[in-house]
Structure formats: structure tokens, C-alpha cells
Image (spheres, rainbow, N blue to C red):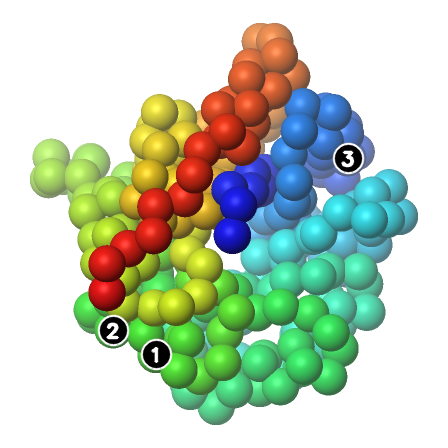
Amino acid sequence: MKPLVQISLDLTNIDEALETAAMAMRAGVDWLEAGTPLILAEGLHGVRKLRESFPNTPIVADLKTMDGGYLEAEMMAKAGATHVVVMARAHKETIKCVVEAGKDFGIKVMGDNMISENMVDGAKLLEDLGCDFIIHHIGYDERRGIKASGGEMPSPLDELSEVVKAVEIPVQAVGGLSLEQAVKCPQYGAPLVVLGAPLVIDADSFKTADGNLESSLKKICDAIHSQTVLTPNR
């Protein structure tokens, strides 16, 4: 799989999200993500607006589903999402339901291993239950809490190579990466590079970052797209 760039629209206003998405597409982004803040603020309306504005672009709905898996996936698919997210810490039956809905409605399922007791095992479970992609994820609140207490900050890169080696499906790494680290993810065997809070979107206000974002984002996309994804030795 060639490297792809996904921008996470972690915004709470659909107009700003659409403006940011348009800029991102001009810069060379491949996938759009309706981030959890946007889904909470705008719901299905936000996903529909993204689909209307970008009819041919993959759209990830970051629901972080924990229950009611089939219905949530169905609703997002009918609104125009091409990918939905289910959590490894959900019940196995919930994950199975999301996977079933994915097959029924022609969308892909991304399994998120955030707060798994063992991140590698969480990724393997998600693959075994039929997910199409793995999100290797260190959570926002977890990072902020550890930072506030003066502890050592965890990073998705800590176990990214192990996760990539453990599964056959594509992996993305999310959570506290610097821009430079995110760009290097394909070198760890993770082809899906996510840009969002706090890389492109301000993580505290969830507003679009200031500056010449489009020009910078184009350079980032070019740097990611030019890479060859490392194939792990399993």
C-alpha cells in the first residue's frame, strides 16, 4: 500500500471543517476524517456535508464505537462515510456487528486499540474479528494527564513496529506525534499518516492553526507520498 495522508477535522463547526477540508484537498491530502469533536457537534449532518462537498473522497467517521455497532456504522455509511472506527475495548460482539455492517453497506472498518491492556494484542484481536485497518492510538486525555503529572510521555512509536509486525492489515499511528514523527510513519511500515490535532489543528481550542497552512501541508503531503512503506520482517 502506498503512503496516504488523512487529515482529521477535529473541529466543532461544519463551515470551518469544510473550509479546512477544501484547503487540505488542494494541498494533496487523500482522506478526510470527520473527527470525534465534529461528529459530536454536527452529527450525521456534518458527514453528509463533507460527502456533498467531496463526492469522490474517502471519509472516515471517527465514532469510536463502543456499543450499538451495527446501527452506528449503518447510519454513518448512509450519510456518506466510507470508513468507521470501532474500539478494541468494545465487546467482541460490537466489533463483529460493525464488521457485519461494513460488509452490508460497503464501508471499511478501522479498529482502534486505544487503552488496550496490551496494544499489540488489541491490534491482533481487531484483525481477527475482521477489521480492515488498525489505528494504533495513544489517547488525548491519557497524554495530557501523564504530562501534567510529570510522567514520561507515551508515544505510538513506542510499539508501532511491533503492531505492524503482528498484523497483516494496514496500520496508522495516532496520538501526540510531532509533525516530523508523523511524516516518518511509513518508515515504520504504517502507510496511513494522520494529520490533525495537534499537528494541523490546535489541540486545545480545536480551531484551525494559524499561518500559511496550505503551503506547509502541500510540502508535508509531498514528503509522505514520496516514501516507500517499509515491509516488516514477520
Furthest residue toward left: 151
Q: Which residue is mark 3?
A: 18
Kindly report the distance in space between the C-alpha atoms of the residues bearing marks 3 and 1: 35 Å
What is the secondary structure assignment of the residue under circle 2? helix
Quick check: 129 left or right of 124? right
- Which residue reaches farthest right? 52
Please tell me the numbered disc located at residue 62: none
Residue 103: % across, % down: 67, 81
- Say which quadrant the C terminus sits in: bottom left
Q: Above or below — where is 90 with respect to 60?
A: below
Image marks 3 and 1: residues in contact by CB distance under 8 Å: no
Residue type at mark 1 is: Leu
Q: Specify the quadrant of the image occupied by residue 118.
A: bottom left
Label 1 close to label 2 by CB (< 8 Å): yes
Q: Nearer the viewer, mark 3 or mark 1?
A: 1
| Residue ID for mark 1 | 125
* Residue kind at label 3, given as amino acid type: Leu
Q: Is residue 152 visible?
A: yes
Q: Position of residue 176 (x, y in %)?
A: 33, 37
Q: Residue at x 39, y 49 (%)?
A: 190
On the image, numbered disc 2 is attached to which residue?
121
Q: Quadrant of residue 117?
A: bottom left
How many marks can you see? 3
* Secondary structure under the numbered disc 3 in the rendered image: helix
> What type is the residue that disc 2 sits on?
Asp
Label 1's element? helix
In the image, 126 versus 15, the foreground residue is: 126
Q: Is residue 148 above or below residue 222?
A: below
